[in-house]
Amino acid sequence: MPLLSIITINYNNANGLKKTMDSVISQSFKNFEYLVIDGGSDDGSLDVIKNAQAVHYWVSEKDNGIYDAMNKGIIKAKGDYILFLNSGDLLLNDSILQKVINLNLKEDIWYADLIFDFGNGNHKLMKLPKTLTKMHMYKDNIWHPTSFINRSLFLKYGNYNLMYKIAADYDFFFKAIVVKDASTASIPFPTALYDTSGLSSLSENLDQIKKERVMIHQSYLTIDEISYYDNLMKFKIQSFSKWLINKPKATRITNLLFNVYSKLRN
């Protein structure tokens, strides 16, 4: 039975932290360590941490952003797998961890669907493909509140890159899954509720996310590989997408026809 390390980061979100901690501590599955990394809150979050049971490690000090805080948790973690459940995010019910463990998964990363909480009781189930492809990881991501990550991956490939302010988790998953071929397994049910008020969910940060993802692609892929994936996103045909590589005139004509078609269809 694997030991889990559950890491919650928090900054001035005492109410969300209390809900998150309650959802973890109430789990019927008990073979986990719980680490809470606080960024020096002054809103009562420390009282929530100090009054809670079953917190194995906590610290409250200034950090350099969410990924710096997550890295602090990784350094202290001792579990076989790590789950990041940030303040405001909830495990769906008291038996969800046991349900995951009962699957007896052996892959490097286990991932699940996620329920997004948009406030005022507005929830939406968001799904991921049952098999992760490189194309999926190029255009999308998996979600850390429902991703159980073998701790050895951080030892092999490093912790979150603080150069990225919003997309460091994408950088890690892209490197592990696409570049290093880490094995993955789909958990056939959602495991968490995600608080959409977080940094990466804010609409004003979407441009920054796109910018950082472009940087990540450029750091791991060749120009031809990026061209291929960009073509495949549009045209969905592998052979045609490969054919267009290094054919700028054909690419311009194809893109023009594609844009005309898209406008007519809409």
Image: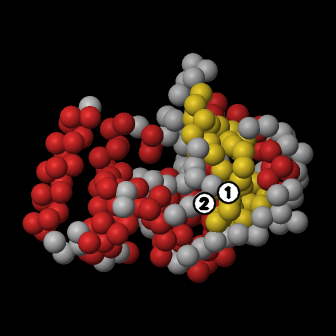
Colour approach in the figure:
secondary structure
Which corner quadrant of the image does residue 191 belong to?
A: top right
| Residue 258 higher or lower than 253, as above or below | above
Residue at x-position 85% and y-position 51% = 98
Res 115 seen here: yes
> How many marks do you count on the picture?
2
Q: Which residue is mark 1?
A: 186
Q: Are marks 2 and 1 in contact (CB under 8 Å)?
A: yes
Q: Is residue 215 left or right of residue 58?
A: left
Task: State the image coordinates of residue 148 (x, y, percent, origin top left).
Answer: 68, 59
Which quadrant would the C terminus be assigned to in this image?
top left
Q: CA distance from mark 2 to mark 1?
A: 7 Å
Res 168 seen here: no
Residue at x-position 14% and y-position 65% = 250
What's under tag 1, amino acid-wise? Ser
Residue lying farthest to the bottom in this orientation: 156
Residue at x-position 83% and y-position 39% = 94
Q: Is residue 42 left or right of residue 163?
A: right
Other residues around mark 2 within 10 Å, as few (<14) / some (14–19) / many (≥20): few
Q: Nearer the viewer, mark 2 or mark 1?
A: 2
Which quadrant would the N terminus be assigned to in this image?
bottom right
Q: Is residue 63 left or right of residue 17?
A: left
Task: State the image coordinates of residue 249 (x, y, percent, origin top left).
Answer: 10, 66
Q: Which residue is mark 2?
A: 131
Residue at x-position 83% and y-position 63% = 104
Numbered badge on residue 166: none
Task: State the image coordinates of residue 190 (x, y, percent, origin top left).
Answer: 69, 43
